[in-house]
């Protein structure tokens, strides 16, 4: 079983602060996706990273895929209350057997206090 | 519709009863996935359909769980003899092709919250 460990599990910060959350595994993934989930909603895709070392930016969010494609990070600059939510990373393990299930981490629950 | 829809949004049932959960994927998406999310956890894979066939059902916890997608669009997840441990949010997702070409980008519905008393 390929596991994704996310840290920290909970994070509470003041508006305007910067933060980084991490997603780590001992396994290699062909791609890794970051989702944000709000209470009572399904996860919403933020970004997909595919290439080792890749960096993608989405406004104040910066995503990085590790060189070995085993880990990823999400950095948020000047956090806003609207960034509050559960951030999930999900890996596509690509076993080659034709299964396209995603393996999810447990998530980081972020609260941005005004 | 514009996104993945799931019905009902909430389902409360008694232990031992049978339930059906429905998923309407994004129009044109050939791949459909069911996941289960327990409190404080990330979604866990249950089953994946490519068209009408279940291409991977390795995540179904036991034979009380079954899913169908007879016409390659709407899917129904069926749970027999429900147990309290089945209580969770059941999420459905769809993707355009379900292959490496689209990087497997999956779009999720809002989920059905199942409570077994």
Image: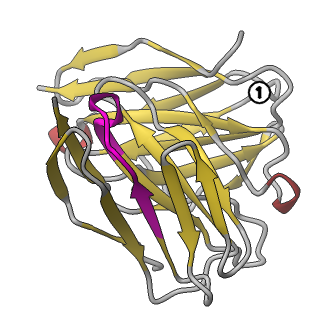
Residue drawn at x 15%, y 47% is A13
Question: In the rendered view, would you say B103 is above or below A12?
Answer: below
Q: Report which quarter residue A8 is drawn in.
A: bottom left
Q: Report which quarter residue B114 is drawn in.
A: top left
Residue drawn at x 82%, y 24% is B71
The location of residue B89, given as percent across then percent down, is: 33, 33
Question: In the rendered view, would you say A99 is above or below B72?
Answer: below
The location of residue A61, given as percent across then percent down, is: 49, 50
Chain at numbered mark 1: B
Left or right, B97 with respect to B81, comes to right
Q: Nearer the viewer, residue A31 or B13?
A: A31
Which residue in the protein does label 1 denote?
Answer: B70
The location of residue B99, given as percent across then percent down, is: 83, 56
Residue B53 shows in this picture: yes
Number of marks in picture: 1
Tell me the magenta residue range.
A73-86
The location of residue B112, given as percent across then percent down, is: 39, 23
Residue drawn at x 61%, y 53% is A57
Left or right, B94 with respect to A13, comes to right
Question: In the rendered view, would you say A30 is above or below A67?
Answer: above
Q: Report which quarter residue A51 is drawn in.
A: bottom right
Q: Quadrant of the C terminus of chain A?
A: top left
Magenta run includes residue B14:
no
């Amino acid at each position: 079983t390929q596991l994704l460990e996310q840290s920290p599990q909970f994070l509470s910060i003041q508006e305007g602060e910067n933060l980084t959350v991490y997603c780590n595994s001992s396994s290699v993934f062909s791609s890794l996706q970051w989702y944000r989930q709000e209470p009572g909603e399904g996860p919403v895709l933020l970004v997909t990273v595919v290439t080792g070392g890749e960096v993608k930016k989405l406004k104040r969010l910066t995503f990085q895929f590790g060189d070995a494609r085993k880990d990823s990070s999400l950095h948020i600059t000047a956090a806003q209350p609207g960034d509050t939510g559960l951030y999930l990373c999900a890996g596509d393990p690509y076993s080659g057997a034709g299964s396209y299930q995603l393996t999810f981490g447990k998530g980081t629950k972020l609260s941005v206090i005004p | 519709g514009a996104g993945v829809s799931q019905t009902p949004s909430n389902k409360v049932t008694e232990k031992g009863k049978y339930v059906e959960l429905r998923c309407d994927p994004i129009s044109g998406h050939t791949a459909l996935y069911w996941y289960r999310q327990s409190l404080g956890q990330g979604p866990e894979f249950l089953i994946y359909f490519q068209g009408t066939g279940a291409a991977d059902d390795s995540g179904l916890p036991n034979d009380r769980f079954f899913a169908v997608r007879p016409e390659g669009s709407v899917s129904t997840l069926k749970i027999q003899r429900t147990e309290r441990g089945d209580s969770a949010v059941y999420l459905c997702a769809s993707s355009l092709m379900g292959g490496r070409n689209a990087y497997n980008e999956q779009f999720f519905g809002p989920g059905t919250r199942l409570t077994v008393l």
